[in-house]
Amino acid sequence: MPFAAGSRRELLRQSLFGPLAAGITWSLQTPAVCPKDETGGGNLHVAPFSFDVTPPIGHPCCGGWIKPVEVVDDSLEAKGIVILGAGKPIILCAVDWTGVLNSTHVSWRSAMAEAAGTTPDRVALHCVHQHNAPFACLDAEAIIAKEIAKGRDKISHILDVDWFKKCVNQSRDAIAKAIGRAQPVTQIGWGEGKVERVASNRRVSRDKSGKVLAMRGSACKDPKLRELPEGLIDPFARTIAFFNGEKKVASCHFYAVHPMSFYADGRVTSDFAGLARKALQAREPECAHIYFTGCAGNIAAGKYNDGSKASRADLTQRLLEGIIASESIMERTDTKGIAWNTAQIVPSARLQPAMPTLWGLIENRTNPATNANRLALELAFHQRAQKQIPIVLGSLKVGPVRTLHLPAESFVEYQLNATKFAQSKQNDGFVATAAYGDGGPWYIPTPAEFPNGGYEVSVAFGAPSLAESLSRGIESLLG
């Protein structure tokens, strides 16, 4: 794709990011992290918001390689809060979609920022990561749309662009209205509760050298795989709540597990994580409940889930009980000294397959059409990495409490190591981690796991150096 001559920033404006990203000024950094800090909190307010993001009948699910929407079992939601009084407004939002990637993530954050009168780096936009749901990447959709325009059959769009724009406009309206109803916050509370028999590590079947032999996925019917140990997980649901006196205004919940019990049947659902959140909302209608999926790239419910309807109900109840436990005994602090910190990391794509190879595979009509969609998503990330368009990490700090906002399907080790690192800096460090932010890289294994292979490594679009940059970024935010 040719670019006009000019500065690097001008080149980026003319890149594949298209009209939704028009007007964004890119802040490019070297791979080293660049944190910043704005502090406030003397007059803190929180404005909860929500809006419907249920796709229409016929819309692709999970990027177009499973059955499209036929039935809506329960609605999909975007839920979040605007934090006012801590410098420029801060937005935390979780969407019941599979992922939001690359320019789509940037443009949506920019729209939200504009509605709140803030900057895109102060918007943390995450997906819960259900699979009977949309996978949003405008860049990959543009690639696939060209193939469809050539007359290629049996290939699915990734995203309905016009409908996505409607969702973006809904977010603007929801945020603007919410700010007008913002409620004072006098204290912030935090707690954790153990979640029993939900999460299990997917990469527990290995040979003696550590190489992965088989994946225990979201649902598993293989008794040998289900009998294997739970493996490395983070067993705790964590909650950070915002109080106005004794009134709980909003609760943000964090837990690391792939949130799917079964999928690919064309039935839209928020699945067990969303259903648990909705049950909490029904219990406490005056408090906004928001759920963030943590670093679950290598974590799923496979040990405890056979893919049946009964298992979905069981997982919903167990997660609900863990979240309720996290709120049962909460420590509290005042809101003085609240701060938002960010770090930027520049993405690096793996060397193989190279961009020309990806183009060739996408255009090769002898390849299964569904493969073209995944390859288009990978190509979009390669294009982004070539232009060094950064990924933004974020962290909200209040006293001993931190949130950590990370990209893509990061491995659980990042979450566990973040907590250890924070506790090494202060004895009472509490970190609640949300992943599945900018989904461009897909999976982000730890550097040590790349040689061990397995599914997650095979679909990690980033190079090991991206994993190393992510670790440095986390330490920068928490240090």
Image (cartoon, grey):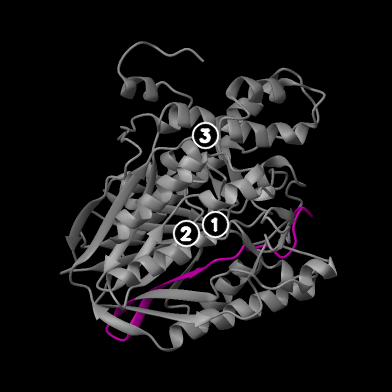
| Residue 51 circle label | none
Visible residue check, residue 157: no
Closest to the observer, 119 or 216: 216
Helix, strand, or loop for circle 2?
Answer: helix
What residue sits 58% from the left and 77% below the top?
279
What residue sits 41% from the left and 20% below the top?
14
The first of marks 2 and 3 along the sequence is 3
Helix, strand, or loop for circle 1?
Answer: loop
Q: Which residue is mark 3?
A: 349
Residue 344 lies left or right of residue 273; in this view the side is: left
Part of the protein shown in magenta: 242-266
**Mark 3 is on which residue type?**
Ala
Is the C-beta separation of discs 1 and 2 under 8 Å? yes
Residue 303 lies left or right of residue 439; in this view the side is: right
* Residue 240, image x, y percentages: 38, 74
Closest to the observer, 77 or 196: 196
Q: Which residue is mark 2?
A: 414
